Amino acid sequence: GAVVSQHPSWVICKSGTSVKIECRSLDFQATTMFWYRQFPKQSLMLMATSNEGSKATYEQGVEKDKFLINHASLTLSTLTVTSAHPEDSSFYICSVSPTSGRGSGTDTQYFGPGTRLTVL
Amino acid sequence: AQSVAQPEDQVNVAEGNPLTVKCTYSVSGNPYLFWYVQYPNRGLQFLLKYITGDNLVKGSYGFEAEFNKSQTSFHLKKPSALVSDSALYFCAVRDYGNNRLAFGKGNQVVVIP
């Protein structure tokens, strides 16, 4: 399947700072990427759909000014958690549905390894 | 809106025994169904999917799943479980023409040596 990377894999930050998480597709292009949040022993909650070259679509209840998404190219989307607070501590996972290259046309979302964010 | 139910929190099975993880779904149109596995502190790995065609789908690591339209189910199965199959398993569904996935709550599978 397609390969998706995330950076960093884990980050610890102080309350009030901003943290940027990158999601890269390594062997394919994708016009759409997805950002999820997962709490311990719980399912994935879709936060937003990231569209290349346009504004992200946020799910109900997700603050777009707090979780800034930039999808500047067909292989990179970033999620910035602004003014992070302890309640933002979570496991953030991106996924990609390839539109060209390896894995394209398969209707399958491929997931990154996740980023563990801890806000002190 | 599409939704998925995974009724059991944890599935315990002895190594070598058959493994079944249950999933039922709800969509307004034709379903696209997926199973993913997650190991601790890792992302999700794709196991298999049903889009159309044969109701029995074979996937990675010896897993298979059967699509049952009348029961709106897509149970995951493996004939002989391994200790290394111990992980968190997610069923997911999306409507045709909608690229947003809805996930079940997940099932923790524990394979006992």
Image (tube, coloured by chain):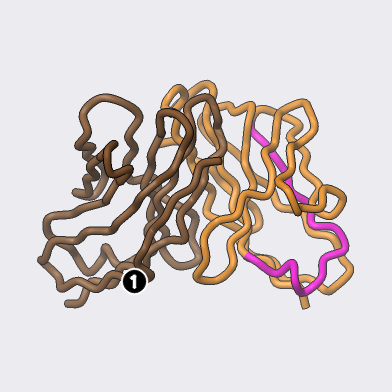
Is residue A28 rendered to the left or right of residue B85? right
Q: Is residue B86 above or below residue B77?
A: below
Name the amino acid type tagged 1: Gln
Question: In the rendered structure, the residue with mark 1 lies on which chain?
Answer: B
Report x, y in % for residue A62. Answer: 76, 52
Of the pair B66 and B42, the residue shown nearer to us: B66
Tell me what hue chain A is rendered in.
Answer: orange
Identify the residue at image location x=41%, y=29%: B30
- Numbered marks: total: 1
Which residue of the protein is positioned furthest toward the front in this rendering?
A: B70
Tell me what hue chain B is rendered in.
Answer: brown
Of the pair A15 and B50, the residue shown nearer to us: B50
Is residue B67 rendered to the left or right of residue A110? left
Report x, y in % for residue A45. Answer: 60, 54
Residue occupied by mark 1: B10
**Image: magenta residue range:** A75-90
Taking the magenta stretch, the answer to whether it contains residue A81 is: yes
* Other-residue count near label 1 (Cα within 10 Å), few / some / many at <14 / 14–19 / ≥20: some
Of the pair B108 and A7, the residue shown nearer to us: B108
